Image (cartoon, rainbow, N blue to C red):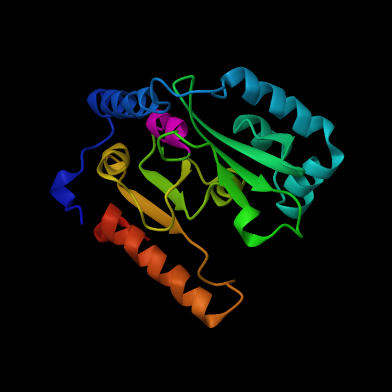
Amino acid sequence: DYTPKSLTRMGGTSVQNRIKLARSAAAQGVPAGRKGHVPTLADVARWHDQLLAYPHALAYVTDTRGLSLDAIRHFKLGALRKDGYDWLAIPTIVDDELCMLKFRNLDPTAPPKMKWRRFAGMRSVMFGAQDVMEACNDEVYVSEAELDAIAAWDLGLRPSCASSLGAGNFPEDWREILMPFQRVYVLYDQLDKPSAEDKQAGDAGAEQAARALGTFRSY
């Protein structure tokens, strides 16, 4: 649990340190020597164009998820078809480097184990790190998952980020990037879970995130 004395106000060195940390994470995004095709920013751009051209995929993002075209463009969301399913591509890009790719199955009848996929071999990077390291305000908004963070951004809650490792998991380098912020708003699914058990899990995840990021500044 961070203590107040570990925080520093936003300034030239704080921003530079954040950029350095984010670039370090990006450099470790794809390990050297990986066999086969490793997705690139060109793939992300192609999938992004496909999303805008696929009515079914676009309807999921705009109607089901309620996201705006501005959010789709800002986060470079895309669509592709693989293994007999349509997928929503959610990239994490830091300093013009593709660090991580996650995919959300758009078929509601797909089995639970096929709901989410991620590109194997890429290092886990905090989603929204680019926006976080460029921010000049005193507050940051932390969500439970990537699509929740995008929705928060769409509502004007910025910078917005999420853990790519599950609720409450924030490795040391991620916490360093978030350290300069004076207020951390934890936007986890606490009130609208479908069951008491899931609500309890959401509450526990929010408490875990607050402890990791500093209870003295978490709301």
Is residue 188 shown above or below 81?
A: below
Q: Locate residue 163, reporting x and y percent.
A: 43, 48
* Quarter-of-image position of residue 71: top right
Q: Which residues are magenta?
A: 128-135
Residue that protrudes farthest toward the left in the picture = 5
Q: Locate residue 81, reporting x and y percent.
A: 75, 37
Residue that protrudes farthest toward the right in the picture = 55
* Quarter-of-image position of residue 80: top right
Quarter holding the C terminus is bottom left
On the rendered structure, is 44 left or right of 133? right
Residue at 50 percent across and 75 percent down: it is 199
Inspect the magenta stretch and tell me whether residue 130 lies in it. Answer: yes
Q: Locate residue 72, reporting x and y percent.
A: 67, 35
Q: Locate residue 46, reporting x and y percent.
A: 71, 22
Give the main secondary structure, helix, strand or loop, of the magenta stretch.
helix
Residue at 54 percent across and 72 percent down: it is 191
Residue at 48 percent across and 43 percent down: it is 160
Quarter holding the N terminus is bottom left
Q: Nearer the viewer, residue 157 or 200?
A: 200
On the rendered structure, is 156 left or right of 139? right
